[in-house]
Amino acid sequence: LVLHGDAATQVVREINRRQIDLLLVSPERGSGWWPFAAEDPARALVRECPCPVWVAARSPKPNLGRILATLSLEDTSVARARDIDVLRRAAALARREGAVLDVLHAWDFTAEERDTSRSCITPAILQGLERQRVAVDEARIHRLLHDAAVTLVPVTLHLPRGNPAEEIRRFIKAHSIDLAVVGLGRRSPIAALWSAGMAEDLMADGACEVLGVKAEDFVSAIEDDIVYARAEDRPSSAA
């Protein structure tokens, strides 16, 4: 299939027309993504493609031995549905490949919570709050695993404290992850930490395969542009 015009726009149009379920994208070439293009088509597709996007690693492996599912644990129905979708897809791939499944949620205290200079916050209290936070998040993840019907797959939970983007990239490198499944929100994602930029950073690293899963309410800017253009082109009805 040969398409003419802006790459991302034409691909999204074809995906909508053919009802494609998954888009496969090749890894970066040379020192950058399509370095001579005005905008890297792969990056634009990760942001705007209405279906899940799978980006290959620079040096793909024949088998997926270790899969990482990243969760946001945001307290909204859409975000919860997205986390469940991430778990279902990651678990299905782990079963098929006979892979180990790691589930990670990176978190941190707010600046106010970390302020141990206040008389009411001591290092000991902060450690207690950390244990409490981890226990609560572990319980939330177990509920998600139950609702996602994740069975027959060995699962290991990880709740590192720190910047989510940094912790995810650190974990991928430290544990030789073969595939990272990440959730993406609508156009600009539900939360900045779980943005298309996160997936783009992982793709730029090229250390592992990346599967970007879209939220239920995802609306592509390209789709909106197409709909708007069609509305503009539509002849007005006769009076």
Image (cartoon, rainbow, N blue to C red):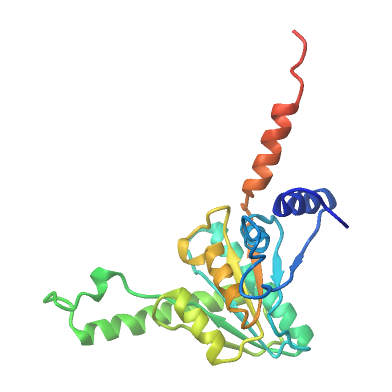
Residue lying farthest to the right in this orientation: 1
Q: Nearer the viewer, residue 109 or 58?
A: 58
Residue 204: x and y in percent read 59, 74
Image quadrant in which the C terminus is located: top right
Q: Residue at x 67, y 65 (%)?
A: 34
Residue lying farthest to the left in this orientation: 119
Residue lying farthest to the top in this orientation: 239
Residue 40: x and y in percent read 64, 61
Examine the rendered structure and indicate whether residue 217 appears above or below residue 28.
above
Instruction: Determine if residue 83 is in view.
Output: no
In the picture, measured across the screen, residue 22 lies left or right of residue 115, that is: right
Examine the rendered structure and indicate whether residue 24 appears above or below residue 209.
above
Residue 223: x and y in percent read 68, 45
Q: Residue at x 53, y 54 (%)?
A: 188
Instruction: Determine if residue 13 is in view.
Output: yes
Q: Residue at x 21, y 85 (%)?
A: 123
User: For the image shown, how many numbered marks are present on the structure?
Assistant: 0
**Quarter of the image holding residue 63?**
bottom right
Examine the rendered structure and indicate whether residue 224 appears above or below residue 231.
below
Q: Residue at x 50, y 74 (%)?
A: 140
Q: Nearer the viewer, residue 172 or 107?
A: 172
Image quadrant in which the N terminus is located: bottom right
**Quarter of the image holding residue 214?**
bottom right
